[in-house]
């Protein structure tokens, strides 16, 4: 299956009341961008800080993403918003299979694999914010130098303090919205194994619906609202 096929399947299931619940409101894309830096033998996640003026999750760390424009496909929105939020110009060149094949146009035409992770939404404003809707999450994995990529980083939008987070530190970092789950799911999709994988798995298990049908555990809510402080 190709990436667009995976997206269409998830949307169809949501519209039929299966799988992820469809939440009316603002529809967005989010991008989990992971760099395997062979020279440092580390995996790094690209994140930024949300502007202090934001109504939802001000000053929280976040992965790049933005709203899907009218008549815009999710995969095109992901490419556009990633360029606006990070300065990295990515183009999908082959979407005939999963993962889609892409290149970083302004970073030595580096090749990249692009996966569709899933659709994320919640009726709980403490997770989803005040504008409702849902997010279609994509995951990108490249082999490259974080030092080289830093040369082009810069946001045209409202993402501040762009930086690379060691993937081993994700478990103790607070993220906006449901983005820690997006990151955790994407790591599974990308085959990323962290030194703190056991703690990530505990977090992941907390996401499972309980017997009473609650879609988010109280432990997850506490993790979003009262998580550990950042360590940078």
Image (cartoon, rainbow, N blue to C red):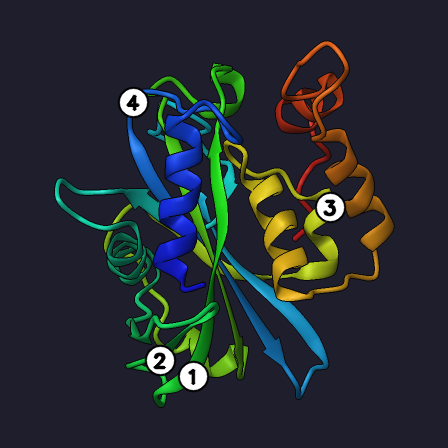
Q: Quadrant of residue 158?
A: top left
Residue 53 horizontal side relative to residue 207, left or right: left
How far apart marks 4 and 3 lie (CA) works out to 29 Å
Mark 2 secondary-structure assignment: strand
Extreme residue toward the top, this view: 212
Q: Where does the image place residue 152, in percent across and percent down from the top left?
A: 34, 75
Q: Residue at x 38, y 36 (%)?
A: 12
Q: Where does the image place residue 95, in percent across and percent down from the top left?
A: 34, 70
Q: Residue at x 47, y 69 (%)?
A: 99
Residue at the spot of label 3: 171
Q: Residue at x 13, y 40 (%)?
A: 70
Mark 3 secondary-structure assignment: helix
Residue neighbourhood size for the residue with mark 4, other residues' Cα within 10 Å, grouped as few (<14), some (14–19), many (≥20): few
In-front residue for pair 164/121: 121
Q: Quadrant of residue 67?
A: top left
How far apart marks 4 and 2 lie (CA) works out to 32 Å
Q: Which mark is residue 103?
A: 2
User: Considering only order in the chain, which callout, 3 or 4, is on the residue closer to the N terminus?
Assistant: 4
How far apart marks 1 and 2 lie (CA) works out to 4 Å
Residue neighbourhood size for the residue with mark 1, other residues' Cα within 10 Å, grouped as few (<14), some (14–19), many (≥20): many
> 32 above or below 229?
below
Q: Which mark is residue 111?
A: 1
Kindly check if marks 1 and 2 are in contact, taking CB atoms under 8 A apart as contact.
Answer: yes
Mark 4 secondary-structure assignment: loop
């Amino acid at each position: 299956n190709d990436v667009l096929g995976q997206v269409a399947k998830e949307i169809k299931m949501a519209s039929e009341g299966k799988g992820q619940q469809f939440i009316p409101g603002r529809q967005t894309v989010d991008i989990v961008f992971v760099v395997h830096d062979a020279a440092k033998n580390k995996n790094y996640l690209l994140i930024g800080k949300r502007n202090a003026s934001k109504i939802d999750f001000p000053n929280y760390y976040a992965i790049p993403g933005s709203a899907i424009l009218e008549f815009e496909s999710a995969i095109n929105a992901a490419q556009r918003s990633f360029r606006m939020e990070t300065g990295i110009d990515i183009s999908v060149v082959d979407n005939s299979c999963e993962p889609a094949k892409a290149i970083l146009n302004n970073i030595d035409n580096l090749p990249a694999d692009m996966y569709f992770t899933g659709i994320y939404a919640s009726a709980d404003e403490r997770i989803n914010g005040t504008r409702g809707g849902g997010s279609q999450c994509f995951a990108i994995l490249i082999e490259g130098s974080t030092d080289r990529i830093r040369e082009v980083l810069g946001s045209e939008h409202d993402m501040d303090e762009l930086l690379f987070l060691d993937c081993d530190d994700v478990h103790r970092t607070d993220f906006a919205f449901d983005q820690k789950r997006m990151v955790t799911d994407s790591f599974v999709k990308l085959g990323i194994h962290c030194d703190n994988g056991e703690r990530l798995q505990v977090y992941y298990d907390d996401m499972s619906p309980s017997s009473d049908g609650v879609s988010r555990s109280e432990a997850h809510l506490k993790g979003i609202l009262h998580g550990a402080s950042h360590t940078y």
